[in-house]
Amino acid sequence: MTELSDREAELVSAHEQERPARQLGGPLRLGVWIVGGLLSVYSLVVVFRPVEALEHRMTFLAVALPLVFLCYRSGWPSFVARMFRRGAPASPPPDTPAKDDPLAGVSRAVAHPEGTRRPERPTVADWLLAAASLAVLVYPLLDIDGFRNRGSGAALTDLDIVAGLALTVLLLEAVRRTVGWSLAIICIIFLIYAYYGAYLPIDWTIGHRGFDLGQIVSQLYTGTEGFFGVPMQVAASYIILFTIYGAVLDYSGASKFFIDLSFAAFRKSRAAPGRTVTTAGFLLGTVSGSGVATTVSLGSVAWPVLRRAGYPKEPAGGILAAGGIGAILSPPTLGAAAFIIAEYLRVSYLEVLLYATIPTLLYYLGIFLAIEIDSRRFSTRAVQVDAPKAGKLLLRFGYHFSSLILIIVLMALDRSAFQSVVIATAIAFALSFLDPQHRMGLKRTGQALAKGTLEVLPVTAVCAAAGIIVGVITQTGLGLNLSAIIVDFAAGNLVLTTLMSGIAVMLLGLAVPVTASFIIAAVIIGPALTTLGVTQAEAYMFVFYYAVLSEVSPPTALSAVAAAAITGGNTYKTMMMTWRYTLPAFLVPFAFVLTPNGQALLGQGPIGTVLLMTVVSAVAVAALALATGGMSGWPERVLAAIAAVLLLFLEPVPIVAGLAVLAVAGAVHLVRSRRRDPA
């Protein structure tokens, strides 16, 4: 699984919020490969030889932003593109790209409309934009101290302001190219608000005194509150290191091992195919980190197995999408937003992993229970898969787990997340020499380093552009004002505020990528929750889960749409099946926000309380599984759903009531079953 096939890449680019990249060829492809590899090397070196924060983030963006303009198509109407087009496309290569081309699958390139993947040349406009990006980011680096002082002293020169405005426009275009218009439009709205805020009615809560261009540029360009704030820090420090690690794992053969092991581990029972797909999705998430990409990569292998097992198209698509989205929800890598949580809370990344551990266990428990129920409901059967035995695989290739475990161990020993992942990457590299087929020689190492950078380009554009939103909110005080509006609208009721917050985050996630929706929601909705007594950790984790779950939420449900495209099932029905499989992930976040004992689900509190609340929540998840498919009649389903909600209050009286209602549901189910089948 070193690269996505043409069909898989087409599905990813069609259904993921990231836009497809160009398929570069010739010397330019090599040049991009070299520059990307060098940026990865720089990112690895900086871990042990730190660079001042602003300088590091500017340097990283100075390399990444020009690559965005060279690697990603403009997407403008053809008559506009023709004005800047330089020559005709190069002659088409053979139908299949080079197997080890890091730009093939990595950059989400799609198949050419005629069925071949032709190399594309950047236009003159692309080169000009790349050069302008380099200029406006290298310019401050020539005298970084003087530049910083001019910003802090409100003494920006005209050239500073012009460069800052140019970078703003360039970032808007970069984010438009990589993830579409939605985030770019949101950023423009925030910029207009910052400039014209003084013209709002004086009695409006969100009104402010207004800021001129110099003040806005100073906020966004000269410090670490705007373009180069926390989101950019996360992209340039955390995410790039984990994408390099994922690339090394991929090139060293870990992806193939994870899939083979998953198929080998569950080969006997009729529920085995579904459990296999879910487990493989969890393991592949350590390499991919993308819900849609994991769904598509997994689907190409697993859908034939699920079909042979007797799964209808829609339930199979639901399993694929639910397994894929687990790539963003599950330790040890989680998604990009998890790194931002660590920065916002000023805690170690290991602590964020601990926050996510119990919710992840409950998430997969819900999926496994639903799969077990559906295996009986659809009369699925065991499927014989041509795979080595699990024991043999573990003995031969089990070393692929060692670097994953090492990350956790090193962080537990107080190593930083940066150093931990770099050391784990080095171990994964060294262990690749145990497998002659995936030995990391000079060529494969260069390709892995290039892939690490190319994977992070869309996230970098998103994080830098999100800095506009964060900077404006900080400068104008909008975050506190909007959070006050939310609380007032909910009349200070925590339940209503939380419900409104969950809906708002999901709606936001329908328009912008997970990382951007988390950043925006964290600075607006987070304060609304903390105002009502919710801890910051609980608030941020709530926002995190609902930002991620937007990928499986109708009407877009990107992962579900991609799964339906693979199975050929009805898209809406696949969405609803995915929603059913992922239902615990929608409800559990309410538990750790609304109930005093909810913090136990984040691993906070006495160990006894944590264990007890985990068990109670597991019973609640089981009740949800029964309510959504495990019981045949509506009376018992409704009772099971009520029991699940009561149990998730995690307080003594509701727990006892929930267990009692669940027992009644079971009794009703038995009575009704015996009446239907007296024998």
Image: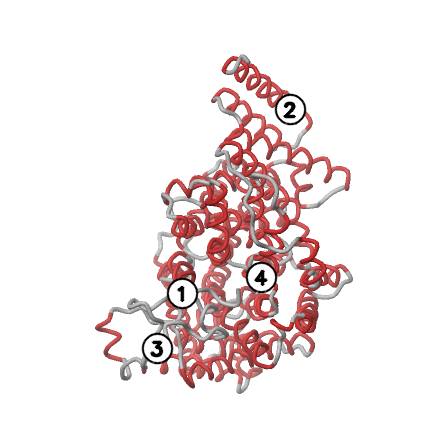
Mark 4–mark 2 Cα distance, whole angstroms, equals 43 Å
* Nearer-N-terminus badge (4/3): 3
Mark 1–mark 4 Cα distance, whole angstroms, equals 18 Å
Question: Which one is in front in this view, the residue at disc 3 or the one at disc 1?
Answer: 1
Residue to which mark 1 is pinned: 6
Mark 4–mark 3 Cα distance, whole angstroms, equals 30 Å
Residue at image location 69% in from the left, 57% down from the top:
392
Residue 255: percent from left, percent from top: 58, 62
Residue at image location 69% in from the left, 54% down from the top:
351
Q: Rate crowding at label 3 as few (under 14), some (14 to 19) or many (20 or more) other CA atoms within 10 Å.
A: many
Question: Which one is in front in this view, the residue at disc 1 or the one at disc 2?
Answer: 1
Q: Which mark is residue 659?
A: 2
* Residue 198 appears in view: no
Residue 355: percent from left, percent from top: 66, 49
Mark 1–mark 2 Cα distance, whole angstroms, equals 51 Å
* Residue 18 appears in view: yes
* Amino acid at dot 4: Lys
* Nearer-N-terminus badge (3/2): 3
- Position of the C terminus by quadrant: top right
Mark 3–mark 2 Cα distance, whole angstroms, equals 62 Å
* Nearer-N-terminus badge (3/1): 1
Q: Secondary structure at mark 3?
A: loop
Q: Quadrant of residue 435?
A: bottom right
Residue to which mark 3 is pinned: 120
